[in-house]
Image (spheres, rainbow, N blue to C red):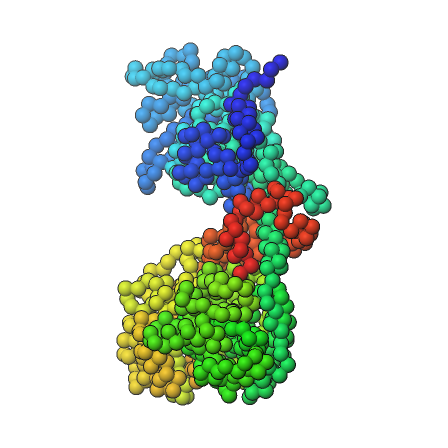
Amino acid sequence: MAKAKTPENSAKAKVQKKYATEDRLENEKLSVYLGAQGAKVAKQHLGLETLSDVLEFYPRKYLPRGELSSFAELVEGQEATLIARVLKVTTRNMRARRGSITEVVITDHLTDEPRQPTPQAYAQPGRADYRFAPGGNGRPNTANPRISGSASGYSDSFGAQYSQGFDMGQVFGDYGQPYQAQAGFAPLGSPSTMTLSFFNAWTAAREIHAGDQVMFSGKVGSYRGELTLTNPHYAVLAENQARVDGATAETIERAKSRANAPIPVYKASAKFPTDRVAKLVEKVLDKAPLKDLEDPIPADIRRKRKIPSLAWTYRAVHMPDSEETWRAALYFLRYREAFVLQSALARMAASRASQQTVARPAKTGGLADRLLELLPYELTEGQRKVGEEIRADLGSSSPMNRLLQGDVGSGKTVVALRAMLQVVDNGAQAAMLAPTEVLAEQHYRSVLEILGDLVAEEPVNEGSPAEKTSVHVVLLKSSMPAAAKRKALLDISSGAADIVIGTHALLADAVQFVDLGMVVVDEQHRFGVEQRDALRGTTGELPHRLVMTATPIPRTVAMTVFGDLDTSVLDQLPAGRQKIQTVVVPLAEHPAWEKRLWQRAREEVDAGHQVYVVVPKIGEDDAAGAVAEADGALFGSAFSSRAATGESARGGELNSVLSMSEQLADVPALAGVRVEALHGRMDTAQKSDVMTRFAAGEIDVLVCTTVIEVGVNVPNATLMVIMDADRFGISGLHQLRGRIGRGSLPGTCLLVTTQPEGGVSRERLAAVASTTDGFELSRVDLEQRREGDILGAAQSGKKSTLKLLRALTDAKLIERAREDARGVVADDPTLAGHPDLARTIDRALDADREAFLGRG
């Protein structure tokens, strides 16, 4: 017999026919499965357009459905699942508050004891609720208005007629008024009916009708002494065939088999609740030929790791029959993400190996060696070890791609300078990219001071690199006078400049290096991915690259865990450096402590020390994050993202530089104290003047923004008060407190907040106060903000391409995926023999985004 042509079979045939001529089933438009109107709704409410969009629209959590129970087995407070007959559905506006309530009266469909049913009709005369017995005198049965019963066990044809939910038409009451009735059952001797409540649930009101059999799941509660379910999950069941009314109907057998299955909960809205999302997803899964999906994991690895098909995996994650099922499905999906990512990294590494750079080996007796002789102190063991790692990298023809992490003041600058001198010893140029002019100037002065007699004020033609005995260092920044900038650009383009230190001005098209052998990116959390990478393209050869930071941004931490960056750690502070004590000052619980803040500041001033007071904005009209651009934080990463953490903005006015300066002038404890302001809107000369006078001890308290986050070195500054500290991110706070305790004097950092205890911001502040370890803080940052876009150039975790994989919790899984991926790419570097994997990588990222994978 020919198979009946159902809508489901037609959809699959249509997809299979079209798929035969297209590369990717995942790209199918949802109109194929949902029709034009359904696809429009999916895009409007959920942003879903293709099959892959639906498959990867994963549940955000799962709820227990509870045991399949009869009414008599229900226990208040426990999860339960009921299969019931609907007797009546009413919707009305609530009296005490805005919105509507839909009440669904149901009777038990699972009671085992057979009973002879008595058909009843539910009439609705206004707000009255009477029941009528057909064949009677037409008057309300006021003596027993709430007869309860079960709809199971009947066998007569009269009862069967009622099972179809027929309409009794007009039934007349006491006064001859017409009552519109809906048919139902109230079998004699049954335990009870139950009333379920849906609040503001228009979808339930449209989809559930009298006479339907429905599976309901939820926590059993009580109202006025009767058991009930409130806003339960539901599925309309089909006794003969699906009713076409917008609901997804299931057979009773299928419903019973899934009665104890977990309930997937999706990202939803009031207009498109999670139950409706689940039905949409199930409809697509039922119609799509999932067995034809391309699997990026080669068959031999699937066998080795016992990985099931994509068809099983997607069904298991969206329609699980147990907790074990969805957990297994999520594990396999995370592995697939890790495998695709690691394959992309491995393919990129193979390509990079074929694009070798120029080796810059160490020269015995060269400038790098002479630097060690000139230093007035011994390098720490960590500095020596890291120096040797970098020394070996530079001597290789494979481009160095190394992350140097060390707490503020751990000696990263000396390590980087020694590496740059090794490059200069080979006749090449080195560049150091700093995020702000303040930091660039600080590095320029520090480098000149460290080099001492090795500095050449003007370029000197010394012949071959082996004869080079001095170094010409050039500073390039946007605010330089035109003549000075032209000279700097000429020195760079002629090769006279050995080491160039600058801001993003180095990224301009006018900057042309003769032979750029190495790029050092300092405080990399202040740059976007593209900016950190831009210097790579200014010369034909690929330069070696060293990135330095005291707190890696989440993306870099993720990349480190994923194994793409080589990492060096400076975990020792130079001799004489003191630890910084960090304390959270919760003004929400202790408002009187604000007075003590300024008393504490006065104590430091009286002891001959200096104080920073840091605030999140410049003026009253500024937003907290807007100050970042003015102060040089190119992408505002110093500030926390409440959108990323899910924390709402608090009320109240934030402190600003201008208001705080005026406020401190009136604080009795600070009478006679020299207070001045510093912020990014001041011109370069003004900023330089304030910092010079602060460094000279002519200013006691400096009220500032994050303009001092990096690059400011005043050893006499021992106290930092950060107002509205909850408005700053972890990396920004860690960098800010690194401005104190830079000499032999201990430092104290006070994190002042008005946020209540228990929020994400308080957790962030507690983490900063608990440790000065940069990697530990970056792990916390990663947990709170998520990874940046591993497969692209985004910096915040909110735009992460990864949907399920997490760098911190999936480290072991990632290691297995890396092992498998590297094996595949080692045998097939271009993945020509693995087209499914190559296409999946290409679908996830274009060539430009793949190139960013290894760029930290």
Q: Nearer the viewer, residue 800 or 138?
A: 800
- Which is nearer the eye, 255 or 52? 52
Q: Judge by depth and name the residue closer to the eye, 475 or 492.
A: 492
In the depicted structure, whether residue 407 falls above or below residue 246? below
Give the tally of numbered discs. Answer: 0
The location of residue 570, given as percent across then percent down, is: 58, 74
In the orientation shown, which residue stands out farthest toward the front?
463
Question: Is residue 139 depicted above or below 483 in this figure?
Answer: above
The spot of residue 633 in percent (x, y) is 40, 66
User: Is residue 28 in sight in this rendering?
Assistant: yes
Write the residue at 50% across / 57% down.
788
* Residue 789 appears left or right of 100: right
Placement of 656 over or under 191, stated as above or below: below
* Image location (x, y in percent) of residue 88: 42, 25
Give the residue at x 39% y 33%. 202
In which quadrant will I find the N terminus?
top right
